[in-house]
Amino acid sequence: MSNAYQLIWFRQDLRVRDHAALWHACQQGNSIALVILSPDQWKQHDDAPIKISFYLRQLKKLQDELVALHIPLVIQVIPYWKDIAKFISDFSKKYNIENVYANIE
């Protein structure tokens, strides 16, 4: 068995049920989940506090459901979306990520 991991990048869709990226990643082997919070980007987009609150409540539920599936969740704060690609690249090298999975949104 490979010591590589599959990375599931949860963006807006924080469901476990009927989540294609999660399913496909788990079919390939051990997986790690990732959620990126971008508060400065949210401010630029004038996201409503109620929207952010809802997202964070859903994040807590996701975390609990992933624990039951034995999938660790990494929550990373990256202020702006433009910096996410580099973070994922560096993270993938550091943790031996074989593939990155994300739903089309």
Image: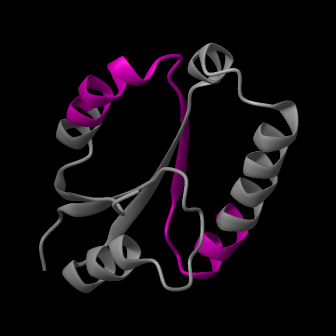
- The residue sitting at 25% across, 24% down in the picture is 86
Q: Is residue 48 above or below residue 34?
A: above
- The residue sitting at 51% across, 61% down in the picture is 72
- The residue sitting at 68% across, 16% down in the picture is 43
Q: Is residue 9 above or below residue 61?
A: above
Quarter of the picture holding the C terminus: bottom left
Percent x, y of residue 9? 39, 53
The reply, left or right, for residue 21 in relation to residue 39 is left
The reply, left or right, for residue 80 in relation to residue 101 is right
> Magenta residues, as a range?
63-90
The reply, left or right, for residue 86 in relation to residue 69 is left
Q: Quadrant of residue 47?
A: top right
Percent x, y of residue 99? 17, 59
The reply, left or right, for residue 53 in relation to residue 83 is right
Percent x, y of residue 15? 59, 72
Q: Quadrant of residue 3?
A: bottom left
Between 17 and 104, the residue placed more toward the observer is 104
Percent x, y of residue 22? 39, 74
